[in-house]
């Protein structure tokens, strides 16, 4: 009789829960926005826009020089200006393939001097187009915008701001890789916990 009572008492005792406690989902970690890199991207975009305007001005001048026979040498001069302006745009993308063969463009002072050179080439617009006020206005906007970008690049290069930007970029890449690795670890942990719950009797 006493044995039956003990069995009934033990059967009513709560059994320990072997199910692992649910883990609270970790919030997605996002890298902080670097204001210096954001400013550099905005400035690069403005530089590319100024270089595109210079390309438009020099192309129009080259077409008029070749078509009307005003000055063949001026047309060739404009073609060189267009090629250098295109090179400036590619340099602003900081494409690794281009930077490998143009180490000078890694330094902001080198970029600035190249941009100033294109701005001066664009400013040398033939006087025979003085009646085209729209073209002259576009020329002034394009050359002075790129000239200002070049001066800022040279000044920033003298102040070694280019090294600061590259250091910030490396830090951002490292942070993004760390966040990616952390997300992969969290995903793997969730998969292992799911397998543990399924295998638990």
Image: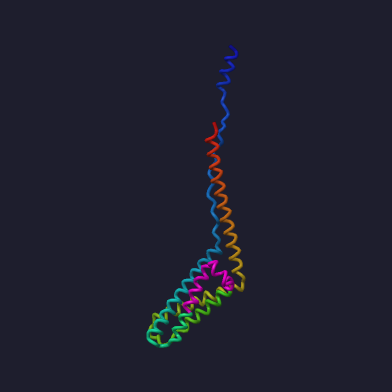
Q: Residue at x 56, y 31 (%)?
A: 17
For the residue pair 77 and 137, the one nearer the viewer reads as: 77
Q: How many marks?
A: 0
Q: Quadrant of the C terminus?
A: top right
Q: Give residue 22's position: percent from left, percent from top.
A: 54, 38
Say above or below: 105 vs 72.
above
Q: How is the image coloured?
A: rainbow
Q: Is residue 86 magenta?
A: yes
Q: Give residue 79's position: percent from left, percent from top.
A: 46, 80
Q: Which residues are magenta?
A: 81-108
Say above or below: 164 vs 134.
above
Say above or below: 141 vs 168.
below
Relative to residue 162, is residue 142 drawn left or right? Answer: left
Q: Is residue 128 magenta?
A: no
Q: Quadrant of the N terminus?
A: top right
Most common SS among magenta residues:
helix
Q: Residue at x 54, y 77 (%)?
A: 114
Q: Residue at x 55, y 75 (%)?
A: 112
Q: Residue at x 52, y 69 (%)?
A: 92
Q: Give residue 96's position: percent from left, percent from top.
A: 55, 66
Residue 4: quadrant of the picture? top right
Relative to residue 155, is residue 70 drawn left or right? Answer: left
Q: Give residue 71's position: percent from left, percent from top.
A: 43, 87
């Amino acid at each position: 009789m006493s044995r039956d009572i003990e069995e009934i008492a033990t059967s009513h005792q709560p059994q320990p829960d072997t199910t692992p406690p649910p883990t609270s989902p970790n919030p997605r970690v996002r890298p902080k926005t670097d204001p210096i890199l954001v400013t550099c991207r905005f400035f690069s975009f403005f530089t590319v826009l100024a270089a595109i305007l210079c390309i438009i001005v020099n192309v129009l001048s080259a077409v008029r020089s070749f078509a009307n026979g005003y000055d063949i040498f001026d047309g060739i001069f404009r073609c060189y200006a267009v090629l250098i302006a295109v090179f400036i745009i590619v340099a602003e993308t900081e494409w690794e393939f281009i930077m490998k063969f143009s180490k000078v463009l890694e330094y902001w002072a080198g970029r600035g001097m190249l941009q100033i050179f294109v701005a001066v080439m664009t400013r040398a617009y033939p006087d025979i187009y003085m009646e085209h006020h729209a073209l002259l206005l576009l020329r002034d906007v394009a050359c002075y915008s790129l000239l200002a970008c070049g001066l800022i690049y040279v000044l920033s290069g003298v102040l070694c701001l280019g090294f600061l930007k590259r250091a910030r970029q490396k830090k951002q890449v490292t942070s993004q890789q760390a966040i990616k690795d952390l997300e992969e670890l969290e995903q793997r942990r969730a998969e292992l916990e799911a397998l543990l719950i399924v295998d638990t009797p």
